[in-house]
Image (spheres, rainbow, N blue to C red):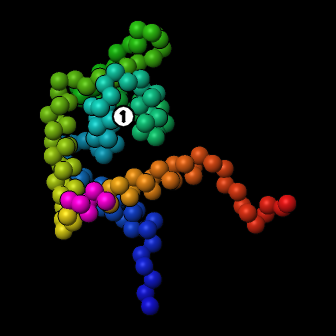
């Protein structure tokens, strides 16, 4: 009797294929997935501190700084000094960014439509709710230390 698929492998494959399909659609923009992601985060949080954005994206501040340098050189974002802290920078989109964001959102919606083909709206909603619950469970678990019960002695 064949065993059921491993959820970790399936989730990994689905995430990889979603990224791949999105990148296929977005190739002509000349932006990397990381640059798209940074623009998406920034579009929802304009005026955010550079270090806070790195935390949200779960990347090192120096990695974000390199992304920002490229996007600033292309005219899509701007850094402004934080009036409350001269060492910190606040991030904003320029007027050139919104048309790119519209392309990104359209490409993302087309990719999701392809991924959800054959699933009813209710099934899609249940899937997303279940995945959010799994994410919450894992976030809570990751915040706790791992205890190897076999090595614990009374």
Residue 49, compared with residue 17, is above or below; it is above
In the picture, the quarter occupied by the C terminus is bottom right
Q: Residue at x 34, y 21 (%)?
A: 47
Region in magenta: 121-126
Residue 75, position as x, y percentages in the image:
23, 25
At label 1, counting other C-alpha atoms closer than 10 Å, the crowd grade (few under 14, some 14-19, many 20 or more) is some
Q: Residue at x 39, y 63 (%)?
A: 11
Residue 121, position as x, y percentages in the image:
20, 59
Identify the residue at the far bottom of this view.
1
**Is 38 within the magenta?**
no
**Is 125 within the magenta?**
yes
Q: Is residue 115 left or right of residue 47?
A: left
Q: Quadrant of residue 112?
A: bottom left
Residue 7, position as x, y percentages in the image:
43, 68
Q: Is residue 138 left or right of residue 47?
A: right
Residue 34, compared with residue 133, is above or below; it is above
* Along the line of sight, the residue nearer the viewer: 2 or 119: 119
Which element is circle 1 on? Answer: helix
Q: Is residue 111 left or right of residue 14?
A: left
Q: Residue at x 41, y 23 (%)?
A: 49
Residue 60, position as x, y percentages in the image:
49, 36
Q: Quadrant of residue 79?
A: top left
Residue 5, compared with residue 127, is above or below; it is below
Find disc 1 in the rendering and name its residue. 67
The chief SS type of the magenta part is helix
Q: Residue at x 17, y 27 (%)?
A: 96
For the question of whether residue 18 can be seen, the reply is: no
For the question of whether residue 101 can be seen, the reply is: yes
Identify the residue at the far front of this view.
122
Q: Is residue 76 left or right of residue 62?
A: left
Residue 153, compared with residue 141, is above or below; it is below
* Along the line of sight, the residue nearer the viewer: 20 or 1: 1
């Amino acid at each position: 009797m064949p065993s059921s698929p491993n959820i970790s492998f399936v989730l990994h494959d689905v995430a990889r294929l979603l990224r791949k399909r999105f990148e296929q659609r977005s190739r002509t923009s000349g932006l990397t997935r990381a640059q798209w992601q940074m623009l998406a985060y920034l579009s929802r949080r304009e005026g955010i501190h550079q270090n806070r954005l790195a935390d949200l994206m779960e990347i090192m501040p120096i990695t974000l700084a390199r992304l920002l340098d490229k996007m600033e050189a292309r005219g899509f974002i701007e850094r402004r000094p934080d009036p409350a802290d001269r060492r910190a920078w606040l991030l904003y989109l320029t007027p050139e960014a919104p048309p790119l964001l519209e392309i990104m959102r359209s490409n993302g919606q087309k990719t999701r439509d392809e991924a959800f083909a054959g699933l009813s709206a209710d099934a899609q909603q249940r899937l997303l709710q279940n995945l959010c619950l799994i994410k919450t469970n894992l976030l809570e678990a990751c915040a706790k230390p791992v205890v190897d019960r076999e090595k614990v002695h009374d």
